[in-house]
Amino acid sequence: MDFTRIIELASYTLPAIVTGFVAYRFFELHIKNNDKKRAFLLNREYQKQSLPIRLQAYERMTLFLERINLTKLLIRISPISPDKHDYENFVIDQIEQEFEHNLTQQIYMSDECWTIITTAKNSTIQIIRKAAMSDRVDSADKLREVILNDLLEKQSPSNAALGYIKNEVSELW
């Protein structure tokens, strides 16, 4: 083979290789772009379907926090006997049952939000226990009175948790 034949062969082969490489890169970028677009659309569809469920979870936990708000709780639950310990245990059992009923909602919330809700529940129980141990409490009615008077001076733990839930839900938009 002579030199001119090699140059002629290279002049046909080199453009074909360059064209093939450019086509390969173009299709590779095109496929990646389509994959990203498909992933974006799937994610958007998933969010469209999961948002109502998440909002429902926040609604249920808002209802839970409203139900364990000590002011409303003590008005709603009357003493079952004059004994302060019976009433204390009864009210705490009501809070625990309500909480257990809503345990599954945590999978739709952030860990921080769930921790704040759990802390509000535990703080509410602690307020009840602390008031029941007081020397000035000798009956169930007196327990209610002491807790309600203490709440006049400070905010209920459930109100702080409600504020956090409202803030977190506003970030969903």
Image (spheres, grey):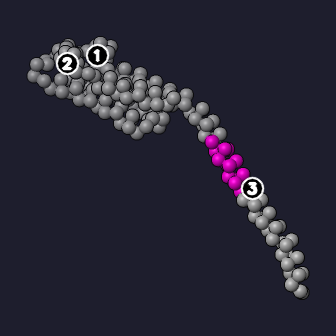
- Say above or below: 104 vs 146: below
> Which residue does the numbered mark 1 point to in the structure image?
71
Decide if residue 77 is in sight here: no
Dot 3: within a 10 Å radius of its alpha carbon, few (fewer than 14), some, or many (20 or more) residues? few
> Which residue does the numbered mark 2 point to in the structure image?
153
Q: Nearer the viewer, residue 8 or 16?
A: 8
Residue 89, how many percent across, how many down? 26, 25
Residue 82 picture quarter: top left
- Helix, strand or loop at disc 2? helix
- Helix, strand or loop at disc 1? helix
* The magenta segment: 28-40
> Which residue does the numbered mark 3 point to in the structure image?
27
Direction from residue 91 to residue 105 in the image, left or right: right
Residue 69, how many percent across, how many down? 32, 20
Q: Nearer the viewer, residue 164 or 53?
A: 164
Residue pictured at 60% horizontal, 32% vertical: 48
Dot 2: within a 10 Å radius of its alpha carbon, few (fewer than 14), some, or many (20 or more) residues? few
